Image (cartoon, rainbow, N blue to C red):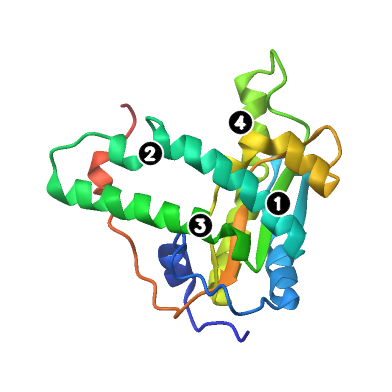
Amino acid sequence: MPKLNLSADEVLTTTRAVRKRLDLERPLDMADIRECLEIALQGPSGSNTQGWQFVVVTDRVRIEAIADYYQQAFAVYEAGPYQPTMQHTDDPSMQQTQQRVLSSAQYLAASMPKMPALLIPCSTGRADVSGLPHSAIASMYGSILPAVWSFMLAARERGIGSCWTTLHLQHEREIATLLGIPDGIMQVAMIPLAYTKGTDFRPAPRKPLEEVLHLDAW
């Protein structure tokens, strides 16, 4: 797909977690995905280790199997204390936002078997090793997150929607077996991918900077 005519600032401020506007009927061009991954490889990593691996799943049988694991995990999440409607608030606008977030998440879970592609970014080494210091864990995630975000920004520029998800990690071992991911390789996310229905995304409402900025001290 031809790239959108967007400035760097526009790409950075309008790359959304896309769920309901994913076009599940339109096949993805693997050339677009490869271009986005080439850009992702330019991301920084701790000590330039480049310890990332990327699994792109397009096989329908495997996508449906992964989707089943995702839906099982989502059912647990939806019934638990962490999904948005359980965050009690008296603010009507916040309640509406939470309902929209939940509705969007429900749609994504239901649509997962129909996704044109899934991207599973992985990292060499594991963060769940007993006794691993916080600094090492932070370095591990900090060495994969910039690359994945670069991928998602490049995808936006090509009219591809993406959404960072982690619920499948409740079944990481089963999915590793399904995809032949070796021991010692840690899955860090799963990114559903599809061209978007329209490309007119806007900046999202966010907290004012002054509520989160601390100069020199907290």
Identify the mark nearer the N-term, 1 or 3.
Answer: 1
Residue 211 visible at all: yes
Residue 159 pos. (x, y %): 54, 77
Residue 42, visible in the rendered structure? no
Amino acid under label 1? Ala
Q: Residue at x 63, y 84 (%)?
A: 1
In the figure, 175 relative to 106: above or below? above
CA gap, disc 3 and disc 2: 16 Å
**Residue drawn 53% across the image and 75% down it:** 23
Q: Closest to the observer: 155 or 38?
A: 155
The residue that label 1 is drawn on is: 65
For disc 1, the neighbor class at 10 Å (few under 14, some 14 to 19, many from 20) is: some
Viewer-nearest of discs 4 and 3: 3
CA gap, disc 1 and disc 4: 31 Å
**Residue type beneath disc 3:** Ala
Horizontally, residue 70 falls left or right of residue 65, namely left
The residue singled out by tag 2 in the image is 83
Q: Foreground mark, 3 or 2?
A: 3
Residue 113, how many percent across, how many down?
A: 62, 60
Judge depth for marks 4 and 2 and give the one in front.
2
The answer to whether 25 is drawn above or below residue 127 in the figure is below
Q: Which mark is residue 38?
A: none
What kind of residue is marked 4? Ala
Lower position in the chain sequence, tag 4 or tag 3: 3
Which circle marks residue 110 in the picture? 3
Q: What element carries label 1?
A: helix
Q: As drawn, which residue projects farthest toward the bottom?
A: 2
State which tag comes first along the sequence, 1 or 2. Answer: 1
- Mark number for residue 138? 4
